Amino acid sequence: MSDCGKRAVSVIGFIGSVFSPWYRWSGRRNPQNHVCINVATYGPGGRFTMTDRGASALRQTNSRFEVGPSMMRWGGDQLIIDIDEVSGPPLISRIRGQIRVVPSALTDVELALTEDGAHIWRPFAPSARIEVDIDRPGWQWQGEGYFDANFGTRALEEDFSYWTWGRFPTASGATCFYDAMRLDGSELAAGFRFDQAGEAETIPLPPKARLRRSLWAVKRETRADSGFMPRQKLAMLDAPFYTRAAVETQLDGERVTGVHEALDLRRFRSPLLKPMLAVRVPRRAKWSFG
């Protein structure tokens, strides 16, 4: 998120593109044949790019993840993201530029989201600075950054019906919440506090607090001090099953604004959604590196 609070960017690298209809239709047999670097910019002139690419577009080393024309790479003490993507309809245009994520520290924290460890969340850099330089007017800015990863051996909708996640920068570092309802009826409820050195501690969970539903009426909730009503500060992604937004809440008396997501996997399981997603997520099976 930009320091002014008016712009934001998210970049997600996929091996096995979780929300790609093409990956689902393939039977999810070959994750390396459905790879993607999804780039979305939020605020004035925002764009959404998510191209499902084939195995020929993937190159990896210990320090580099390359998918077609875009890549993520470690350079010294920072994550450098070079992007060259085309946004989907209705606003089709090319987005080129570079994003740098500079962590204050890296962590080795992992959280198993299911008892058998089929889904893992790892917050590599809970606190970071971000520098954005995209070839559009107004898209050169600095702000608050974050870097994490999710790993899984089963489809999300096979184990979960609903989840929310939130990461909120604080005066001392950052606080993250993970809440989910599993298909077997059990619940995940976890909260972590990170300091600037990357040290983590579990925290007593504040009560759940409702947010207004998204434009597609996706249910939303987060954590907040008792009696405080969280509110949306910046709309980001709004899909029939998934929403992302900048949200203001209050934790231990401190008002904080961070990124919040809600995912309704009951809706995502609907086969009716897949053709709609295919419009926003084009498939490009062939790629040749020059």
Image (cartoon, rainbow, N blue to C red):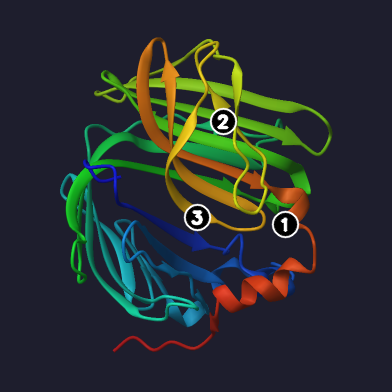
Horizontal side, residue 117 vs residue 2: left or right: right
- Between 15 and 48, the residue placed more toward the observer is 48
Relative to 71, 153 lies left or right: right
Give the percent coordinates (x, y) of residue 142. Answer: 18, 47
Disc 1 designates what residue?
Answer: 268
- Which residue is denoted by mark 3 in the rendering? 237
Instruction: Check whether the beta carbons of the residues at disc 1 and disc 3 lie within 8 A of each other.
Output: no
Indicate which label's residue lies in the foreground, 2 or 3: 3
Label annotation for residue 178: 2
Residue 174 x/y as whole percent: 35, 26
Residue 217 x, y percent position in the rendering = 67, 48
Residues under labels 2 and 3: Cα distance? 19 Å
Q: Which of marks 1 and 2 is nearer the N terminus?
A: 2
Rounded to the nearest angstrom, the CA distance separating label 1 from label 2 is 19 Å
Instruction: Classify mark 1: residues with Cα within 10 Å, few (<14), some (14-19) or many (20+).
Output: some
Q: Which residue is drawn at 61% across and 68% down?
A: 20
Check the image and report above or below for 281 versus 256.
below
Tell me the element at label 3. strand
Query: Which mark sits nearer the N-terminus, 2 or 3?
Result: 2
Q: Where is residue 159 in the image (x, y as percent from the top left)?
A: 75, 43
Q: Which of marks 1 and 3 is in front?
A: 3
**In the rendered image, the vertical position of residue 211 relative to residue 67, given as above or below:** above
Marking on residue 164: none
Q: Can residue 26 be seen in this view?
A: no
Q: In which quarter of the image is the C terminus?
A: bottom left
* Amino acid type assigned to the residue bearing label 1 in the image: Phe
Amino acid marked by disc 2: Tyr
